Image (cartoon, rainbow, N blue to C red):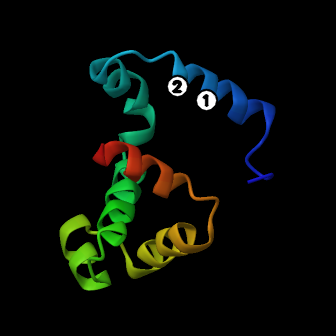
Amino acid sequence: SKKIKTEAAKRLFQAVLTLETEEECFTFFEIFVGKELLAQRFEVASMLYDKHTYLEVADKTGASTATISRVNRSLNYGSDGYDMVFKRMKK
């Protein structure tokens, strides 16, 4: 978590917090989601969180097993960011 706490990351997060609608999110995140990397990893995390197998995740998302493994490691040993978001989304 300390590696991400940079001034550049802080400014990015401040920018994200100004977004008010889903449409604004689509407009802003277009630069990140254009190659679908961010969206794909979020979908991988969501499926792993819901206990889908690597094979199911790979089939649905097209992510490589290396990507799935990295996301899984973040889910299990990261700073619980995914867990926080997924719990909030289920409310």
Amino acid on which disc 1 is placed: Phe
The percent position of residue 87, horizontal first and vertical second, equals: 39, 51
Q: Residue at image x 28%, y 83%?
A: 53
Q: Quadrant of the N terminus?
A: bottom right
Distance from label 1 to label 2 (Cα)?
5 Å
The percent position of residue 33, horizontal first and vertical second, equals: 37, 41
Specify few, some or many for label 1: CA neighbours under 10 Å numbering under 14, 14-19, or 20 or more: few
Q: Is residue 75 above or below residue 53?
A: above
Q: Is residue 83 above or below residue 6?
A: below
Residue marked by disc 1: 13
- Foreground: 84 or 40? 84
Q: Which mark is residue 16?
A: 2
Q: Give the SS element for disc 1.
A: helix
- Foreground: 76 or 57? 76
CB under 8 Å between discs 1 and 2:
yes
Q: Residue at image x 30%, y 76%?
A: 51
Q: Residue furthest front?
A: 91
- Foreground: 48 or 61? 48
The percent position of residue 86, horizontal first and vertical second, equals: 38, 52
Q: Quadrant of the C terminus?
A: top left
